[in-house]
Image (cartoon, helix red, strand yellow):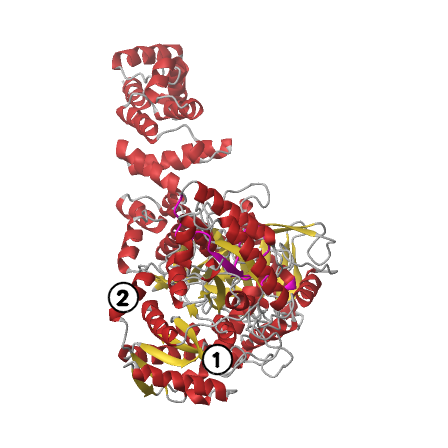
Amino acid sequence: MDFYKHIVQKLAGEVNAKEVSPQQIGEDVARRCAAVHEKCNAFIKFDPELIEKGIKDISQKIAQNKKLPLAGVSFGLSDAICAGGTTTTCASRMLESYRPPFEASVVLKLKEWGAFPAGKTNMDEFNLGATGKNSFFGEIKNPWDTEYTAGSGAAAAVSSRAVNFALAPDGCGELRHSASYCGIPALKPTYGRVSRKGLVDVAPSLDQIGIMAPSVLDLAAILEAISGYDPEDPTSFAHEVPSYTLLLQEKENIGPFKVAVPENWAEAPYLEEGIKKAFLETLEYLKKENFQVQMVSLPNFSHSIVTAAIIRAVEAFSSLGNYDGVRFGLRVEGSHLQEMYRKSRTEGFGSNLKQFLTFGALISAGNYYGRVFQKAQKMRTLIIKELESCLQSFDLLFIPAVPFQAPLLSSNDKACLLPDPAGYYTAAANLAGLPAITIPVPAESVSGSAGVQFIGKAFDEAKLLQAGLLLEKENPPRFPNV
Amino acid sequence: MHEYETVIGLEVHVELLTDTKLFCGCSTAFGAEPNTQVCPICLGLPGGTLPLLNKKAAEFTIKAALALNCEIAPKIAFDRKNYFYADLPKGFQISQYFYPMGRNGYIEFLVNGKTKRVGIHQLHLEEDTGKLSHIGDDIISSPSSRVDFNRAGVPLMEIVSEPDIRSAEEARLFLQKLRSIIRYLDISDCKMEEGSMRCDANISIRPVGSTEFGKKTELKNMNSFRSVYRGIEYEAERQRSVVLSGESVIPETRHWDEAKGVTRAMRSKLVSADYRCFPDPNIPPYPVTEEWIQEIKKTIPELPDERYKRLTEEHDLPSSTAEVLTSSKELADFYDAVLSVHNEPKTVSNWIVSEYLGLLNAAGMDITESKITPAGLGKLLQSIAKGEISGKIGKTVFEEMFNTGEDPALIIEKKGLKQISDTDTLSRIISAVLAANPQSIEDYRKGKKRAMGFLVGQIMKETKGQANPQLVNKLLMEELNK
């Protein structure tokens, strides 16, 4: 019964051919999800009914001999993304009982293709980081070693193979951080490639829904499923969706690519030796594979995380202004309106979130608006210009994913900092709206691997996947026993 | 002692006549049950707030900006105005701060026969808030309040005048002209009673001849043209009293109390709200091309000022008549339509202004509800011109037409009102009347002109008013002078 290990297209084929039944899958997935939830607290709450309902729908369709491209494929859905039949909490007490009256466009699409959500995965409150310590629903543990953080329940569920893939938001790199901590590939698409309708707004100019999966081929298959213009998302683009899986099968045309590496990449604060070593080894491998690697000067790249943190904080303070206890969510009564607001938000939001929102409120007020926020917007433009100019002469940018391996849950040294040091290498892709992929390569770490990252041109996910596939061939993914 | 002049600027909000809201498909129909015209977007539900711009609302706003002689913004861009209040579901209002749709325009209107120009500082598009109703007087003193979000998200056009207005009367004339233009464009029905047109005033006073502005107060809650007039008058007088008694005017928001006829302080304006405006990241800017502007220009009808010019210059109508005729599009269109049947501008305009408006006002009716058609009035006037009926009889016929909507020819026929213009018939009647009133003939020959009038009266009585007055005069004169 190792169908859970099959790539999604193979699994769907087996289900369509009735070699594997949806019920079998349902039982298996439920068992594995229960196990990873027990070990890692991967879900907001483990809800076998959600799985049952999903399986029932698919069974009906299979019984009618419908052929579904992702039949029987299970996925973890970050609790920042709206789905029916359950709550969407964003890991916050504020939304503990929130049941949205609609589903995210990506979820509707995946269900249409025969996939089913196996559970809402745990996360940092409103996805402000991948510390695993800022969820109202408890810490998120790494399946490799529960003393360490998984970063997100999505990464824990995918790496322990409880689900075939997961969808999670990426605002400054959280998707890619947690994937690195757990040793799995992840892809953040180009801004506008995937609809954000149903993703709870935090920083709308930075946020994107991304994919975590056990293999690059899986990433390609899911990207194909969820990409495309959505009339309900005015920031989604009408770019044609290529068949990423077919492009990956063209073994002839893969690479060699021209790859740029920022010359000061090693200046990242908190950069660990293990990460450095893994990155350099991978660089050598790329050169061996005839990739043209060149050091480039990107002087503003190192300012990405500060810039992104400022913009994110201002947008988040604005976007979270609807949490006031009036129409939904937690309401704590007060003797007048202001008091109701204050009490509801004080008790509804966690302390890390409150600190971040206060920062956002401060730097967008009075004199700080011009001195901090507008400066950050200008810096953003500079960073974008720098990256785009670089990518005119190169196919890809190559950098580490996170300066450090999965932090210890008991340690606070990297958990409560502003800006989040984990985002040093990842925030630029959010600022510029460019696609990015992280691939695990061998390293001395709790997961036995570290993430390395490619950033590509807008809508050039195909090259990212191809480069990822190449690395994956050399370093087949490893998974913990749960 | 200084003479003080009043300096007034007006902020007018106009609800646009679109079928749906500014950023979602909810209906804008007035009078529905509370919270029945709402959706995740206008309610600001997490995951559901991606705004979808209503193109018609944008077009209406560009149309208004053109009609008010504004410079049009190069792109349609929206910003977030962030603050907390119970009628603001998202915690921010989507408005236009950086790129209002129109800038630097003007409106002209007649004040005591002279043309006055008031500048339009800017015109922009934004969404309306929900409606609050308090169990007590206001949100502070009420034990509870209710909020209806049907109105939240309805497109509002805000027009801000320059502080060029100098009296309550000018303010009233400004509003009338603005309303007239907007109704001509058919983009709003501008009914203050229904709230589709709202007006706040900024009022200050300064010594005549001074170019500096005095401290201003903002006056709200004026719900009719009359309130605006009375409110401004009261406030200007109040400020004069304050200054003349040696005190300074406190800059604050004041509330017009219609019942008591006074203004009352609401809250201090010393600390202005920090709205932290920034471009809404969920709404990509939309280009305003020259082609689009030209297309919209073509849909603008002949506006009041142009019509006024045409009526006074080409049709040679007196200015007061032209003003009345152009005050409403329906009236002006009616005038033009009658002219196309009976091309006598002076006659037609006089009939409309005195007879028609007289009947409409007496019946409390709007021209759109009237049974009179342009063809009807045109035919009536032709009958009079041809001498088929007298002008006096014509008025009777017109009244009948107003009440029944019948064709004038039919009414004349039915009631046998045709004017008697047959010389033989009239001569007989004149002879008869003269024979019956020898004293009058005497009086007339002695020089009493009034006797003539008496005789004409008798002739009219005999003919039930149907004798052709000009012919009667002619024939009678001939007889009397024999």
Chain letter of mark 1 equals: A
Q: Is residue A77 magenta?
A: yes
Disc number placed over residue A250 in the picture, else none:
2
Q: Which residue is mark 1?
A: A402
Numbered tag placed on residue A223 in the rendering: none
Mark 2 vs mark 1, CA separation in Å = 31 Å
Looking at the picture, tell me which residue is in the foreground, A125 or A261. Answer: A261
Dominant SS of magenta comes to loop
In the picture, the quarter occupied by the C terminus of chain A is bottom right
Magenta span includes A179: no
Which stretch appears magenta?
A: A66-93
Q: Which of the 4 image quadrants contains residue B241?
A: bottom right
> Considering only order in the chain, which callout, 1 or 2, is on the residue closer to the N terminus?
2
Measured as percent of width and height from the top left, residue B458 is found at: 40, 16
The residue type indicated by label 1 comes to Val
Q: Is residue B477 above or below residue A221?
A: above
Tag 2 subunit:
A
Q: Is residue B336 left or right of residue B273?
A: left
